[in-house]
Image (tube, rainbow, N blue to C red):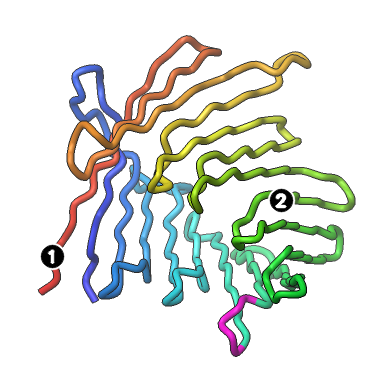
Amino acid sequence: MNFRKTTFEVSIDDNENIIDTISIVKTKTDDNEKTLYTLKEYLPKVDGQPIQHSYFRNDEDLFYQETKINEEYKSIFQTFVNKDNVIVNAQMISIASESPNDTISMNYDYKYDSDGKKESLFITSKTDSINSLNYTEYNKNGESILGYLIFDNDTLQKRKMKYLNGKMIESTYESKEPFRITISTFDSNEKIKSEILYLKINDTIKKASESTYDNSKYDNTELIITKDFLYDTITKKKKITAHLSRI
């Protein structure tokens, strides 16, 4: 199976000339254009820049992901499903050349209402030093609307999602350490339109940056403009996708 598309993320100047290539994502899909495999590389290819291989089931659920940082370290994430193709377990394995492998096992516990619709998901994991819980709440349409990431009874992340006509239109992620709030908006195709980042500076929450995503100017190209309010700068990037026809 050949790659169906390749997406280049590049930095550009004010005249939209390419300055540098930031990353390359190669994607393989099935006949229905569902993603089966992606390869993401960050440039330049130097020690410490990750290379990520991701494999997906036919429903596009991630089942295997390997992230290699350098020759000495990589991590592997795997999910496991039951006979109904529902994820019930997962594990994260950290592999370092100079220390024993570190494995974190995760259990997926779903709660359903009287009609059999999914109401919530509890993902729990435990290591020698940390207990964690990743909680997700769903609406009547099976869409995730609320979530928490908790480590040792300390809430490290909160997330909220809003929908319109079955499509996500906004997401809000709030992280504790370091404190940050990211608010993203999406169009009717659930493609990102904007992203605002808030940081805590000297105990005051400030708008740190705002990014806009424009897919209308060129075919197969996304223009990303980011205003950094803390440093008074503007950066521009493009994501350019090249599609390959099936033979």
Label 2, secondary structure: give it: strand
When the figure is inspected, residue 227 is found, relative to residue 85, above or below; the finding is above
**What is the quadrant of residue 199 in the picture?**
top right
Please give the name of the residue rendered at 81% of the width and 65% of the height, measured from the top-left corner. Answer: 127
Q: Main secondary structure of the magenta part?
A: loop
Tell me where residue 189 appears, x and y as whole percent. Answer: 38, 48
Which residue position holds label 1? 245
When the figure is inspected, residue 224 is found, relative to residue 126, above or below; the finding is above
**What is the quadrant of residue 35 in the picture?**
bottom left
| Labels 2 and 1 touching (C-beta < 8 A) | no
Tell me where residue 145 appears, x and y as whole percent. Answer: 65, 50
Tell me where residue 9 appears, x and y as whole percent. Answer: 31, 41
Q: Nearer the viewer, residue 232 or 102?
A: 232
Residue 190 is marked as none
Q: Amino acid at mark 1?
A: Ser
The region drawn magenta spans: 83-87
Tell me where residue 64 appears, x and y as whole percent. Answer: 51, 72
The image quadrant where one finds the N terminus is bottom left
Q: Is 172 situated left or right of 246 in this image?
A: right
Dot in front, 2 or 1: 2
The image quadrant where one finds the C terminus is bottom left
Inspect the magenta stretch and tell me whether residue 85 lies in it.
yes
Please give the name of the residue rendered at 67% of the width and 77% of the height, measured from the top-left corner. Answer: 88
Please give the name of the residue rendered at 41% of the width and 34% of the height, measured from the top-left corner. Answer: 193
Q: Amino acid at mark 2?
A: Gly
Residue 147 is marked as 2
Please give the name of the residue rendered at 24% of the width and 40% of the height, measured from the top-left corner. Answer: 221
